[in-house]
Image (spheres, rainbow, N blue to C red):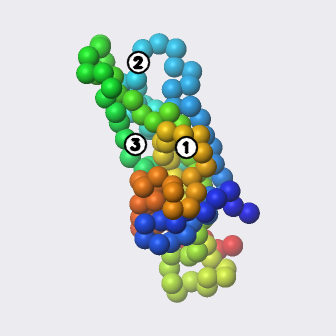
Amino acid sequence: MSLSRIVLSSGRSIELTELRMSSTYGGMLEGYPCKPINDMKVSGLQRQAERAFPSTPVHLVPPRREYPDQTAGAFGPVEVLASVACIGVFRSTAVASELDQVLHRSALTVVWFQTVLDVPSGEDADLALRGIRWEELAQDHEL
């Protein structure tokens, strides 16, 4: 059973089977959101996904970065990522048309950031998430 279904821009339907959400800046005790901190957060979340789901490829949806304050501190200007960091495991029909569609599925683990604490669903999911190039990134496997 899936948590939700998303229709990609390509028209392919994918199912979200597992979702992990966390606060992007939860536990940040000192400093401020800036490029070096955000780069560490993004790469750390990607490594976390790779360790948690080693049997599927991992794709990072490049996060939007906002600059609400142009005043530069010691580490450069304030740079803010969306407040919710997400790791999701998605499944769909097999990519390779020559595979038996009953016995094979495709899978991809996706890392992204979003502004709300909602499960992405349908055609209302964020455009960056819906723009995933599934046929290039997902991996087929036998059930």
Where is residue 91 shown, x and y percent of the image? Answer: 60, 65
Task: Tell me which numbered mark, 2 or 3, is placed earlier along the sequence.
Answer: 2
Q: Which residue is mark 3?
A: 63
Where is residue 47 shown, x and y percent of the image? Answer: 51, 41
| SS for dot 1 | strand
Where is residue 33 shown, x and y percent of the image? Answer: 40, 23
Q: Which residue is mark 1?
A: 86
Would you place residue 62 above or below residue 71 in this image? below
Where is residue 66 shown, x and y percent of the image? Answer: 34, 33
The C terminus, quarter of image: bottom right
Residue type at the position of mark 2: Tyr
The Cα–Cα distance between marks 2 and 3, rounded to whole angstroms, is 18 Å
Task: Evaluate whether residue 130 shows in this view.
Answer: yes
| SS for dot 2 | loop
Question: In the current view of this chain or complex, which residue is farthest to the right?
Answer: 1
Would you place residue 73 above or below residue 65 in this image? above
Task: Tell me which numbered mark, 2 or 1, is placed earlier along the sequence.
Answer: 2
Q: Residues within 10 Å of mark 2 (few under 14, many from 20)?
A: some
The Cα–Cα distance between marks 2 and 1, rounded to whole angstroms, is 21 Å
Circles 2 and 3 in contact, beta carbons < 8 Å: no
Circles 2 and 1 in contact, beta carbons < 8 Å: no
Residue type at the position of mark 1: Cys
| Among the 4 quarters of the image, the one containing residue 86 | top right
100 vs 23, nearest the viewer:
23
Task: Evaluate whether residue 44 shows in this view.
Answer: no
Residue name at image x 48 percent, y 42 percent: 113
Residue name at image x 61 percent, y 49 percent: 119
Q: Which residue is mark 2?
A: 32
